[in-house]
Image (spheres, rainbow, N blue to C red):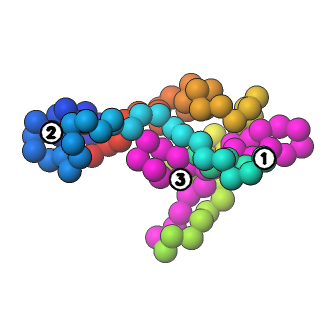
Amino acid sequence: MVISLQQMVQDGGAAVSAAEPVPVGLTLARINQRLHRVFTPCGAHLGNLQYSSGQWKFKAVGYDSDGAILPGWGPLTDRHNTVFAAPDEALLNTTFAAFALTCAV
């Protein structure tokens, strides 16, 4: 279920003030020149954009119940190795539109 900040405030279930923006869209965090981490609006790690052999590729990741990383797994497993022109958040959000949503509560 996706709920807006205004709905949470009206329902009294929000621990954030009405002035704080609701996170929207996937974000990138640059690690180095050849690697960017991809996060959901809520901060969950979905994978990485990795520059290899002249291409930027999305590398999906998941986590097991103990928190160990599982390369090639996670909610974007079917998008593993998707090629991108550059590490660009707008392009990333267009390509993975289903994950470019506000946080679910």
- Residue 74: percent from the left, percent from the top? 54, 53
From which residue to which does the magenta span run?
A: 39-65
User: What distance separates the C-alpha of mark 2 from that of mark 3?
Assistant: 27 Å
Tell me which numbered mark, 2 or 3, is placed earlier along the sequence.
Answer: 2
Q: Earlier in the sequence, mark 3 or mark 1?
A: 1
Please, what is the three-letter code of the amino acid marked with disc 1? Gln
Q: Label 3: which residue?
A: 45
**Whether residue 83 is situated above or below residue 66 in the rendered picture:** above
Callout 3 crowding tier (Cα within 10 Å): few <14, some 14–19, many ≥20: some
Give the quadrant of residue 8.
top left
Q: For the residues marked 3 and 1, what is the alpha-carbon distance in whole angstroms? A: 19 Å
Task: Give 78 or 47, whichever is nearer the viewer.
Answer: 47
Residue picked out by circle 2? 9
Q: Nearer the viewer, mark 3 or mark 1?
A: 1
Question: Real-space Cα distance between discs 2 and 1?
Answer: 40 Å
| Element on which disc 3 rests | strand
Q: Residue, x 35% and y 41% (percent of image)?
A: 103
Q: Nearer the viewer, residue 39 or 76?
A: 39
User: Is 74 left or right of 4, judged from the image as shown?
Assistant: right
